[in-house]
């Protein structure tokens, strides 16, 4: 090997690890799965490795080789390989290396990982890619065959997208002679999945292109990359120090690798070797970033010689948005010999994730793993929007999107299945494993396993800063009803930068006012009731990617509260009487009750039917408010009494928060002055309604927060104050908020004692749901109020109402006895219910 040749290869190898110079970048590879998971050892008898064959340079084998001569030499490699028996790849490659040197077309050749490393007589490098067993003709001992989809013609013929700020690029080997190993229709389908989810409409460039040198260079102009997929041949040489155990050495390492102790990695492009391309990329060829190559196959004719390229060529030409992902689906791209250096070089260019396979990987396995990740990243839809159901198994019912990190991390948790399988059992192989029986994997580092594993180099500081591939995903929603604005709290997976929350509660999609935003929680204001109360809620990323909409379901019901009082005292007087009131109430409630998927591919979990309060459109009216009382006892009494309010309409002492202020209980005439005129002991009082009176809803949030202080007996045996979100297993999740209404100037009292009997009694208001009375502020009384239960059918999301009668210490009739109360009602069909295909166990909410 000439000194010039050695210099060229050394430059290529150093360029791969350029990220380690100056400011070193240290990345710890993340391995998914255990070393033995899904792996099968193949300690079969193998031929003894033969030394590298090196020709002695002669006048006929030295000098400058033209591009035509190199093309002819590489075509001769393919022609000879087609004549070999194809029973053992190692034996065939060793025979091929010997033939390459004896033909005088090459000065040296040796078997490396995934092919043959060689030099031409002029000292320039050459690579023979032999990494795809699907093309090489060797019998496969794998437990299951793969199912490639052959194509007769080139698939990726469309032009590159226009200039953009965000690029999603799929670069794949589109050579028609290699359809057993690569299926570009899949990469085209994956690109279409992003397009169908709105990425192109949002201004992204989404491209599936042949992996030519020209395409790589074109992407470097006005196409900063957020996601790059590479699917082509991979090749790896390694120095003697990392050779496999004795008796299993793969040839003799090449002189350059031995001299530099630096493994060498390259991929194959679709760019055919000719004079024009040689001139165009002369500088890269001289630097060892572009290398004369060919991929061999067992057929009589393979593909034309093409240019190989190193990671340094990619880094030289491509631009990456901070935190971008590079997914290398080729063989050896994450092998331990080069993974750290390659990942560090990409990290230095701003890449947050560099992923790849440790050894020889089946093309269909790599494609199937990619389909799984894209499907979970974009979110399943029913019917499918992405079209990925043709390539991977989807959940039923469909689930929400998850991020790249969660999708990659879940690869080791599930086994391969779905349309890209062949019906043979796949239960032993996870998505992060590819073991198709190539014996070369068993004797390549890491030694002892025939499986290739999917590795991820993850720089969280970079990767988590990239929002471009985030499809916003709502996990749960909770409404806090209030005045003037109700608020909506969303949890899930969102962008770090603030986007928008859209709703169609009214006649059109409108953005909500966002109060706070993180990548896991958003709080936004809901519009007034006049704009609508139920609808579809969606989150939009800063790059205008809209996540799946989630229904905020609304119900309206009609309830009737009835209270009957046996009046045994009235103000300061004992006696007997009866009172009754009837309050029809139109109530609205809204909640997120769609079953949610907590983690990737987990079963949907039902959510609690949780209502913080009634919706702002809830109204009530006091239709009936009446009572009579006849006194039979005496009192110190006075007529008129200066400390007693005059008869007539009374204003309820109940505040809007439902509490009775201290000191506003019954006004006794204990301060009657001497000389006041008492009235007869046997007076009669009548309470009559002032007419239909609008009821004001309580603002109940003040005491919902005190639910833990409520009397547990009165709270109900099944009440555990469940909050919004997924229901715990085993049921018993019952939310127990309170709601109430109060009427002012509700009634008029008249008596036959000149107003004195009425004046000694309570104010004449009516209320329902007063916590001070229902939960026994006055410990002299044992209230057991009626309980109203809303029960939701999780298949139809309809709500039925049931109740129990109770007794309650009430101030509605100025008596000091317990009254009987009941409440009944019905709810209309829900507005914007979740899809009926998502049944879940019954959830209940108790109302007090």
Image: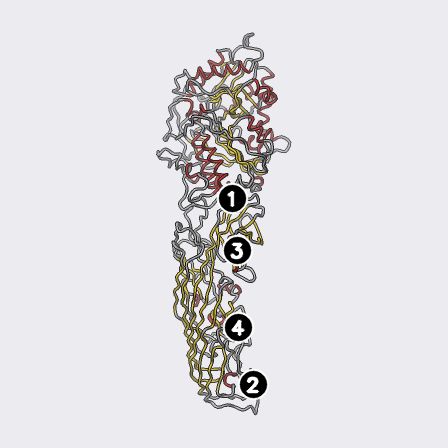
Q: Are marks 3 and 1 in contact (CB under 8 Å)?
A: no
Foreground of the two, 154 or 698: 154
Residue for point 56% across, 86% down: 641
Q: Return the disc, 3 or 4, that comes first in the chain's sequence.
A: 3
Q: Report how far apart the C-alphas of labels 3 and 4 lie in the structure.
A: 29 Å
- Residue 488 badge: 3
Q: Is residue 775 visible?
A: no
> Image height check: is 129 above or below 320?
above
Instruction: Give the image location of residue 415, x and y in percent.
Output: 40, 38
Nearest the viewer among 409 and 684 is 684
> If you read the primary sequence from the N terminus, does the residue marked by circle 4 or circle 1 appear first?
1
| Residue 443 locus on image (x, y percent) | 44, 25
**Residue assigned mark 4:** 654
Residue at mark 2 to residue at mark 3: CA–CA distance = 53 Å
Q: In the rendered image, which residue does mark 2 sit on?
A: 671
Of callouts 4 and 2, the N-terminal one: 4
208 relative to 129, above or below: below
Packing grade of label 1 (10 A; few <14, some 14-19, many >=20) is many
Q: Earlier in the sequence, mark 3 or mark 1?
A: 1
User: Mark 2–mark 3 contact, CB under 8 Å?
Assistant: no
Q: CA gap, disc 4 to disc 2? A: 24 Å
Q: Earlier in the sequence, mark 2 or mark 1?
A: 1
Residue 525 in the image, given as x and y percentages of width and height = 55, 56
Q: CA distance from mark 2 to mark 1?
A: 72 Å
Local crowd at mark 2 within 10 Å, few (<14), some, or many (≥20)? Answer: some
Looking at the rendering, in which quadrant would you find the C terminus? bottom left
Within 10 Å of disc 4 (Cα), the crowding (few <14, some 14-19, many 20+) is many
Quick check: 840 left or right of 103? left
- Closer to us: mark 4 or mark 2? 4
Q: Secondary structure at mark 3?
A: strand
């Amino acid at each position: 090997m000439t000194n010039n040749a050695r210099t060229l290869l050394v430059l290529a190898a150093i360029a791969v690890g350029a990220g380690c110079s100056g400011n070193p970048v240290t990345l710890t590879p993340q391995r998914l799965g255990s070393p033995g998971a899904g792996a099968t050892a193949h300690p079969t008898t193998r031929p003894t490795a033969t030394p590298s064959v090196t020709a002695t340079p002669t006048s006929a084998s030295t000098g400058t080789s033209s591009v035509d001569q190199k093309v002819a030499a590489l075509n001769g490699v393919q022609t000879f390989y087609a004549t070999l028996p194809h029973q053992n790849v190692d034996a065939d490659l060793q025979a091929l290396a010997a033939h390459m040197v004896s033909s005088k077309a090459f000065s040296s050749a040796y078997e490396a990982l995934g092919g043959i490393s060689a030099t031409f007589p002029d000292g320039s490098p050459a690579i023979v890619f032999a990494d795809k067993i699907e093309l090489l003709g060797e019998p496969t001992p794998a437990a299951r065959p793969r199912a490639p989809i052959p194509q007769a013609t080139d698939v990726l013929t469309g032009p590159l997208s226009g200039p953009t700020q965000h690029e999603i690029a799929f670069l794949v080997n589109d050579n028609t002679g290699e359809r057993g190993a690569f299926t570009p229709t899949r990469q085209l389908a994956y690109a279409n999945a992003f397009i169908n989810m709105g990425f192109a409409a949002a201004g992204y460039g989404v491209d599936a292109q042949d992996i030519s040198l020209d395409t790589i260079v074109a992407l470097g102009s006005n196409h900063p990359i957020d996601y790059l997929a590479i699917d082509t041949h991979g090749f790896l040489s390694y120095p003697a120090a990392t050779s496999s155990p004795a008796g299993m050495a793969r040839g003799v390492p090449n002189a350059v690798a031995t001299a530099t102790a630096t493994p060498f990695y390259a991929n194959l492009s679709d760019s055919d070797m000719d004079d024009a391309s040689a001139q165009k990329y002369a500088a890269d060829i001289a630097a060892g970033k572009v290398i004369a190559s060919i991929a061999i196959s067992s057929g009589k004719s393979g593909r034309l010689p093409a240019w190989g390229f190193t990671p340094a060529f990619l880094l030289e030409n491509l631009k990456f948005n901070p935190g971008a992902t590079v997914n290398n689906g080729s063989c050896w791209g994450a092998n331990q010999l080069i993974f750290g250096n390659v990942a560090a070089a990409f990290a230095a260019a701003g890449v947050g994730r560099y992923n790849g396979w440790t050894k020889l990987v089946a093309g269909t396995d790599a494609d199937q793993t990619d389909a799984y990740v894209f499907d979970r990243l974009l979110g399943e839809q029913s019917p499918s929007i992405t079209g990925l159901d043709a390539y991977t198994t989807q959940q039923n019912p469909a689930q929400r999107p998850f991020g790249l990190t969660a999708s990659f991390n879940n690869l080791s948790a599930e086994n391969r299945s779905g349309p890209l399988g062949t019906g043979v059992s796949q239960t032993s192989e996870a998505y992060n494993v590819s073991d198709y029986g190539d014996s070369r994997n068993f004797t390549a580092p890491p030694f002892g396993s025939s499986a290739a594993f999917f590795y991820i180099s993850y720089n969280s500081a970079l990767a988590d800063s990239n929002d471009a591939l985030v499809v916003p995903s709502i996990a749960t929603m909770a409404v806090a009803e209030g005045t003037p604005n109700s608020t909506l709290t969303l949890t899930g997976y969102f962008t770090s930068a603030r986007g928008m929350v859209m709703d169609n509660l009214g006649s059109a999609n409108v953005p909500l006012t966002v109060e706070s935003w993180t990548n896991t929680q958003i709080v936004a204001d809901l519009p007034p009731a006049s704009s609508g109360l139920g609808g579809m809620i969606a989150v939009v990323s800063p790059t205008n990617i809209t996540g799946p909409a989630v229904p905020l379901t609304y119900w309206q019901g009609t309830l009737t509260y009835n209270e009957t009082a046996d009046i045994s005292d009235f103000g300061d007087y004992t006696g007997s009487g009866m009172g009754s009131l009837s309050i029809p109430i139109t109530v609205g409630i809204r909640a997120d009750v769609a079953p949610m998927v907590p983690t990737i591919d987990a079963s949907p979990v039902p959510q609690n039917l949780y209502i913080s309060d009634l919706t702002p459109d809830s109204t009530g009216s006091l239709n009936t408010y009446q009572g009579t009382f006849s006194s039979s006892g005496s009192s110190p009494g006075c007529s008129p009494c200066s400390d007693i309010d005059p008869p007539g309409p009374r204003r309820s002492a109940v505040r809007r928060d439902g509490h009775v202020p201290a000191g506003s209980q019954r006004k006794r005439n204990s301060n009657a002055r001497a000389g006041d005129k008492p009235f007869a002991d046997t007076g009669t009082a009548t309470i009559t309604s002032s007419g239909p009176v609008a009821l004001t809803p309580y603002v109940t949030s003040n005491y919902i927060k005190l639910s833990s202080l409520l009397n547990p007996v009165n709270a109900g045996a099944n009440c555990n104050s469940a909050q919004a979100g997924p229901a715990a297993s085993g049921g018993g999740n019952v939310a127990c908020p309170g709601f109430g209404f109060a009427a002012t100037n509700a009634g008029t009292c008249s008596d036959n004692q000149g107003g004195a009997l009425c004046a000694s009694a309570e104010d004449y208001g009516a209320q329902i749901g007063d916590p001070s009375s229902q939960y026994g502020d006055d410990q002299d009384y044992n209230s057991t109020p009626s309980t109203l239960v809303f029960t939701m059918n999780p298949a139809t999301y309809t709500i039925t109402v049931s109740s129990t009668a109770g007794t309650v210490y009430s101030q509605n009739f100025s008596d000091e006895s317990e009254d009987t109360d009941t409440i009944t009602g019905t709810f209309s069909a829900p507005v914007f219910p979740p899809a009926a295909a998502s049944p879940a166990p019954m959830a209940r909410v108790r109302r007090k």
